[in-house]
Image: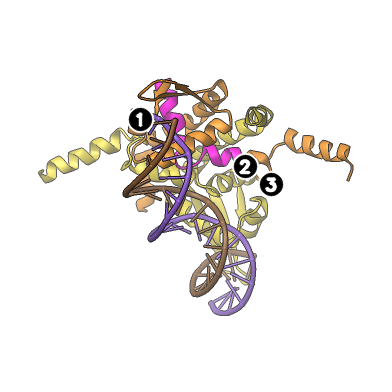
Chain colours: A orange, B yellow, C purple, D brown
Amino acid sequence: MSPAADAQAFLDRAQRANVMAADCPSRVVLQHVTSRWGTLVLLALLAGRTLRFSELRRRVGGVSERMLAQTLQVLEGDGLISRHAHQVVPPHVDYALTPLGAEAAERVLALAGWIEANLPRLLQARAA
Amino acid sequence: MSPAADAQAFLDRAQRANVMAADCPSRVVLQHVTSRWGTLVLLALLAGRTLRFSELRRRVGGVSERMLAQTLQVLEGDGLISRHAHQVVPPHVDYALTPLGAEAAERVLALAGWIEANLPRLLQARAA
DNA sequence: CCGCATCCCAAACGATACTG
DNA sequence: CAGTATCGTTTGGGATGCGG
């Protein structure tokens, strides 16, 4: 297959992105955003505007340092989170949502908020 | 602590459910809904109304039999999916969203749809 | 205070084979 | 067709210690 055809195939896939396709790049982003700690980090930053590492760790109940650092790196890699390290002693690093991240976080909030609001219904359904 | 106080504490937690708290039951539901295959199964059923096991397997690209069966059981346990087995040979089992599951799936669609629509921006951000 | 590196265990996952 | 059982591999994720 020619490079031009390769490029066209890539653009076609990118244009009609489909999470149901196993090899669509949108799957990867979806994994990151819906990952165990990814959702909670996005929610914490949506509520808190800009937070330090330790503040995030306190707000996201149960997360370990390792997982928080790793999650932040992944989301930063996707352009959803911005990281700003002040060069001081002791270290001081701020995290915030990018505009892109804020849009994603709002959708996550819609889902998480619905779950919180409907938890009684969900627990009742679970019992049955 | 008295049983009455215990019960009150439980109700308080249930009433103001908070996914940021490590021990909130809403966390469990969030995990299920945002799990790797959970999101895709919900999306497939939202688009397809009612689907058989093998149809779901075909629509959710890359899922194994094992994981699909397990995911369906979990979501059924949460009351988000209904399962109806016709007693015939060969077997015939239909899956569909419950009203509760449809509400959740719509929120998942909002998120997944945003990712699909903004994939070019996301891939560009990733490159930088 | 931040977060990287290492080690290690447990859970998740996929492939295959098998059953009603 | 719709699963279950078993196995082996991969990944997730906690604990600890170190460096900036």
- The residue stretch that appears in magenta: A27-49
As helix, strand or loop, the secondary structure at mark 2 comes to: helix
**Residue B114 to residue B10: above or below:** above
Label 1 CA crowd tier, 10 Å (few <14, some 14–19, many 20+): some
Farthest residue to the left: give it: B2
Give the dominant element type of the magenta stretch: helix, strand or loop: helix
Three-letter amino acid code at disc 2?
Arg
Q: Chain of mark 2?
A: A
Q: Are marks 1 and 2 on the same chain?
A: yes
A52 on left or right of A4? left
As helix, strand or loop, the secondary structure at mark 3 comes to: loop
Quadrant assignment, res A8 = top right
What residue is pinned by disc 2? A27
Three-letter amino acid code at disc 3?
Asp
Three-letter amino acid code at disc 1?
Ser
> What's the residue at 32%, 32% (across, down)?
A58
What residue is pinned by disc 1? A54
Residue B45, position as x, y percentages in the image: 59, 47
Which numbered disc covers residue A23? 3
Residue D10, position as x, y percentages in the image: 56, 56
Foreground residue among B37 and A82: A82
